[in-house]
Amino acid sequence: MSELVKAGFKVTVLSRLSSDSNATLPDGVTLRKVDYGSVDSIRPAVEGQDAVVSVLGTFAVGFQQPLVDASLAAGVKRFIPSEFGVNTRKAIGKPLGKLLLFKIQLVDYLEAKAKENPNFTWTGISIGLFFDSVRPLLLFCSGTS
């Protein structure tokens, strides 16, 4: 985040209204507490931003649609969903697709919203499985000598 601030970007971090986090943010980063289920709560927090990058965790990805709607209402130009692991387009119709249903539905929603709103774009970043997520599986599966 600090590198984005140094590069001249206005960085705002959204947190749950109920969060008691005492995390410290770099100088120049604004913290806004919002209700992730409310477009009206999120919209003012993203106004004036060019992009929204969602890093919501696996169990919260269902809350991305209000983030999209608030971004559209605020005039945000680009949305980057929490789509960093598996390419959900390749998971459709496969067993993994059932686990990624919320992500698949969100990408479908983003595609529709981008068609309806020519000033709105989205980017999915799929880097494959995170090594830190795989390592415990590798340790669990390894034999003893």
Image (tube, helix red, strand yellow):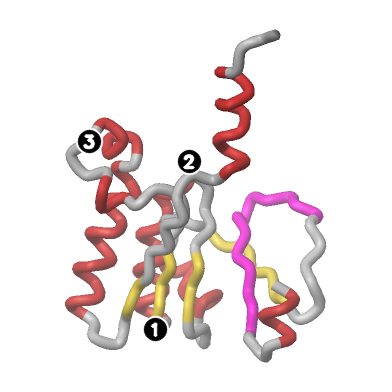
Magenta region, residue range: 10-22
Q: Residue at (24%, 72%) from the top-left corner?
A: 113
| Quarter of the view holding residue 98 | top left
Give the residue at mark 3: 94
Q: Measured from the top left, where is residue 91 in percent x and y? A: 27, 43
User: Mark 2 and mark 1 in contact (Cβ < 8 Å)?
Assistant: no
Q: Position of residue 119 (x, y in %)?
A: 30, 87
Q: Position of residue 63 (x, y in %)?
A: 42, 53
The N terminus - image quarter: bottom right
Secondary structure type for disc 1? loop
Q: Nearer the viewer, mark 1 or mark 3?
A: 3
> Residue sitting at 80 percent across and 54 percent down?
22
Residue drawn at (70%, 75%), measured in percent from left and top? 30
For label 2, the SS is: helix
Distance CA(mark 1)–CA(mark 2): 26 Å
Q: Which mark is residue 59?
A: 2
Tag 1: amino acid: Lys
How packed mark 2 is, by other alpha carbons closer than 10 Å (few <14, some 14-19, many 20 or more), is: few
Tag 2 or tag 1, which sits nearer the N-term? 2
Residue to which mark 1 is pinned: 77
The residue nearer to you, when weighing 37 against 28, is: 28
144 horizontally vs 22: left or right: left
